[in-house]
Amino acid sequence: MRLRAVESLDFTQLEDHTLITTEELARFLRIDPSSVRRWRTGRPQQGPPFIPMSDRVIMYQVADVRQWLASKRVVPEAA
């Protein structure tokens, strides 16, 4: 598996099956990684679905992140 630097993550170029880290997700969303961790560990859980690879490694599938973002989209009604 080839690792990318967080700074070089381009979400538009990633395939749906690609796995990204908590830090990469946070950088894409322009939030602190602690917010992503809080979503994941809070009750009820929030944020996109995640994959626990081990006790310390959590990954997110790009397709899940895209679907989660789409579900959060708000389209204001025309006035």
Image (spheres, rainbow, N blue to C red):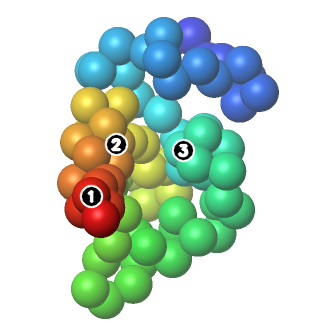
Q: Quadrant of residue 25?
A: top right
User: Label 2 is placed on what type of residue?
Assistant: Val
Q: Give the foreground label among 1 and 3.
A: 1
The residue located at (43%, 60%) in the rendering is 55
Q: What residue would you read off at disc 3?
A: 25
Whether residue 73 is visible here, answered yes or no, is yes
Q: Position of residue 49 (x, y in %)?
A: 26, 54
Q: What residue would you read off at disc 2?
A: 65
- Residue 20's label in the rendered image is none
SS at mark 3 in the image: helix
SS at mark 1 in the image: loop
Query: Which image quadrant: the C terminus?
Result: bottom left
Whether residue 50 is visible here, answered yes or no, is no
Q: Position of residue 17 (x, y in %)?
A: 27, 21
Q: Residues within 10 Å of mark 1 (few under 14, many from 20)?
A: few
Spot the residue most to the bottom. Answer: 43
- Residue 78's label in the rendered image is 1
Q: Residues within 10 Å of mark 2 (few under 14, many from 20)?
A: some
The first of marks 3 and 2 along the sequence is 3
Contact check, label 3 and label 2, Cβ < 8 Å? yes
The residue located at (48%, 10%) in the rendering is 13
Nearer to us in this view, 58 or 29: 29
